[in-house]
Amino acid sequence: MERVVENYILENPEIILRALEVLETRKQEEAQRSRQQALEENRDALFRDQTTPVLGNPDGQLTLVEFFDYQCGYCKEASPGLQQLLERNAEVRLVMKEFPILGQASMTAARAALAAREQDRYEELHWALMAHRGQLDENRIMDIAEEAGLDTEQLREDMGSPHIDEELRRNYALAENLNINSTPTFVTPSAVIPGALPADRLESMLEDQAD
């Protein structure tokens, strides 16, 4: 029987390609099922966590989650499009999941942004950090914060809050549950989409959710 099977494969090598295609399709289907299950299990943490910063309309009907890093070039590429999306669609609710994975400067920037909420300047500092081109360090982050209107002495103090530690831990755990390991990654109620996407593509995906 083994010889028969071997001969058949040798005479019909295209069957290997078909088998690999079937296997890849099954893997993709299984990954999609796992991702959808993870979305359902983590829905509250993703979309309804009251401690997570939200830009745009807090009561909007179209919710988009972004996992991002302030030293990520692709995040910076996506940033102008996200601002355009918020400006032109008043129903978008953008949930900001700080996900510093590119070194100590990323962590410092994330902590500074989260601490800026104490001065009601999260949005200003977020966009300012995203607009910065080049490497970040603590001094440059503080310069950007000052330019964005923050009291940097208070900011440094607030950056040490244990609430920030806990929020970042939750974000890392959530990313692990959803198999997110790169930035930016966007999440809608039915999909996890890695990579920088243009504003019109994001808006189309969100509007599909409302249909």
Image: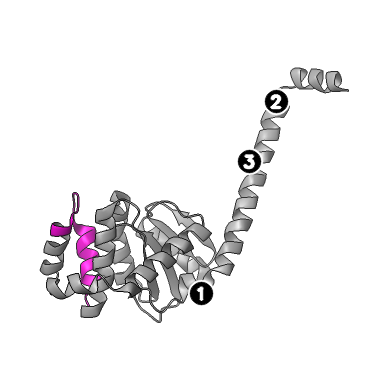
* Magenta part of the chain: 120-139
Which numbered disc flags the more N-terminal residue, 1 or 2? 2
Q: Amino acid at mark 1?
A: Asp
Extreme-bottom residue of the structure: 59
Asked if residue 79 is positioned above or below residue 57 in the image, the reply reads: above
Residue 144 magenta: no
Q: Amino acid at mark 2?
A: Glu
Per the image, the residue denoted by label 1 is 44
Disc 3 versus disc 2: nearer the observer: 3
What separation in Å lies between label 1 and label 3 (alpha carbons)?
A: 31 Å
In the image, residue 12 lies at what x, y percent? 75, 22
**Which circle marks residue 14 in the picture?**
2
Q: Is residue 145 visible?
A: yes
41 horizontally vs 170: left or right: right
Callout 2: helix, strand or loop? helix
Asked if residue 175 is positioned above or below residue 25 in the image, the reply reads: below
